[in-house]
Amino acid sequence: MGKLDGKVALITGAARGQGEAEARLFEAEGAKVVLGDVLDELGNAVARSIGAGAVYVHHDVSSEESWKAAVGAATSKWGRLDVLVNNAGILHVAAIAQIELADYMRIVNVNQVGCLLGMKHAIAPMAKAGGGSIVNISSTAGMEGQPGIAAYVSTKWAIRGMTKSAAIECGGLGIRVNSIHPGGINTDMGKGETKGFEEIDTTAVYKKLPLGRIGEPIEVARLALFLASDDASYCTGGEYSVDGGWMTGRPMF
């Protein structure tokens, strides 16, 4: 028996990194999975490698029409939606004094608006299915200030707040809503490959953590699985760190 037997999950940003790890783990635990992303070649390849229990859809999380189509893909193919993982996110490096408004709004539209729209369009089909679980991927940046990434930080704090509001609104429908706060994770973003981070020795940073290393996508996926499953049946409005101890005291770059 898998932890997600009989459930249908929609995961955004699922073409690689954390989203890919979540999609693979969820399917292995019995779920039917819709993978959403804008990286079509990678996303299709991941879905094919998972097998019949997965389907890929092109999905721009900043677009309301795209959300309607992605949720529709889940309900038309498998008849229901039980789990949503709002995983898609992007990062932009710029000091507040130098940031361009267009760059700021691009981060807001993907990270923050995308999360809001996902919850908006998941509520009705989840309620129809008798309840469900929404897992919003925030960040340790949603629990503290970090220099040079104010746009990203603001969206991750917003996700944290929206999660709590949604938990209050959706509890009576049997829908649980929680946020996950990863620290450094071994993805393109987590390894410091984002433009503006090239000069930072991320390996040295992670060695300063209590656990002394960067995290792996599967470690986030396992926490998402717990929150998506009935094991977390009394968990809502919570915030869960998977950060190697980052929030015990922020390492200095």
Image (tube, rainbow, N blue to C red):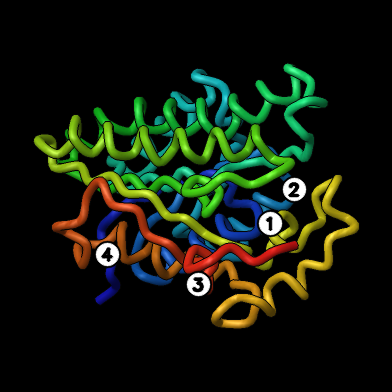
Q: Nearer the viewer, mark 3 or mark 4?
A: 3
Question: Which of disc 3 and disc 1 is earlier in sequence?
Answer: 1
Relative to 248, is 107 on the left or the right?
Answer: right
Category of crowding for the residue at label 1, using alpha-carbon neighbours closer than 10 angstroms: few (below 14), some (14–19), many (at least 20) = few
Q: Position of residue 197 (x, y in %)?
A: 83, 52
Label 1: element kind:
helix
The quarter of the displayed image where residue 211 is located: bottom right
Q: Which residue is mark 1?
A: 45
Find residue 151 and name its label: none
User: Of residues 188 and 37, which is closer to you in this image?
Assistant: 188
Q: Position of residue 156 (x, y in %)?
A: 51, 40
Q: CA distance from mark 2 to mark 3?
A: 35 Å
Q: CA distance from mark 2 to mark 4?
A: 28 Å
Category of crowding for the residue at label 4, using alpha-carbon neighbours closer than 10 angstroms: few (below 14), some (14–19), many (at least 20) = some
**Amino acid at the residue labelled 2:** Glu
Relative to 25, is 252 on the left or the right?
Answer: right
Q: Residue at x 22, y 62 (%)?
A: 232
Identity of the residue furthest to the right in this view: 199
Find residue 5 and name its label: 4
Q: Position of residue 133 (x, y in %)?
A: 27, 48
Q: Residue at x 75, y 62 (%)?
A: 253
